[in-house]
Amino acid sequence: MTLRVLQLPDPVLKKPAFSADPEDPALQTLIDRMFATLDHHPRCVGLAAPQVGTSLRVIVLDASRVDKPGSRHGRLAMLNPSIVHRSHPRLLREGCLSVPDYTGNVLREDRVEVVGLDRNGGTLRISAHGFEAVVFQHEIDHLDGKLFLDRVSSLETDVFRRKSYG
Ligand code: ZN
């Protein structure tokens, strides 16, 4: 079962999400449905729970779905992720299912180390670079109520309209 992806200006997208408890049985269903939703959108590489209306610190991602340079850890679900190290800033174009009509140039770090929990509550530590590192930063921003539009330096020169997602 796929979930509806909320779009701007839905207020849930702007709310900081609550810590996720791996003991919560509803979490497994949520993660399965988030993966199903990710699979449903051909070029979608990541989703955060607030995008599907649940204000919990849960992300799923799969950067290997598109052909872009960087690390490839495949399908990942992470609870309560936090970036413990970041380096190599660069400006990159990105988009979001919750902001379907626009892309934007966002300053991100090319290398990050992310620590959180896997879906069973075990510690998950990932070193990501390139595209996958950007996906982590984008999804973790969603948990803090931030969209890429909040990170562009200028809405006039760094945001671009697009015809359709993908
Ligand atoms: Zn997004």
Image: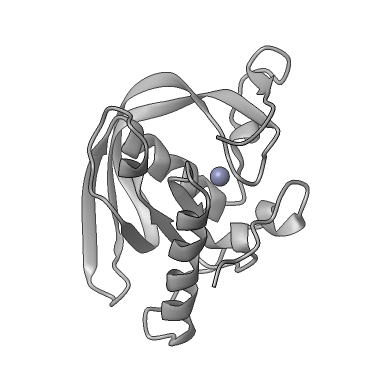
Residue 17 or residue 28, whichever sits in front: 28
> Which corner quadrant of the figure contains ligand 1?
top right
Instruction: Report the residue that reaches farthest toward the top.
Output: 157
**Horizontal and vertical percent position of residue 31:** 44, 70
In the image, is 17 to the left or to the right of 109? Answer: right
The answer to whether residue 57 of the structure is visible from this angle is no
| Quarter of the figure with residue 59 | bottom left
Where 104 sits versus 62, above or below? above
Q: Residue at x 59, y 35 (%)?
A: 148
Q: Residue at x 73, y 15 (%)?
A: 156
**Horizontal and vertical percent position of residue 111:** 27, 32
Residue 120 or residue 20, whichever sits in front: 120
Which quarter of the rendered picture does the N terminus lie within?
Answer: bottom right
The answer to whether residue 87 of the structure is visible from this angle is yes
Where 82 sits versus 149, above or below? below
In the image, is 103 to the left or to the right of 10? Answer: left
**Horizontal and vertical percent position of residue 71:** 22, 37
Q: Residue at x 59, y 30 (%)?
A: 151
Give the number of callouts: 0
Q: Residue at x 39, y 35 (%)?
A: 134
Which quarter of the rendered picture does the C terminus lie within?
Answer: top right
**Horizontal and vertical percent position of residue 61:** 39, 52
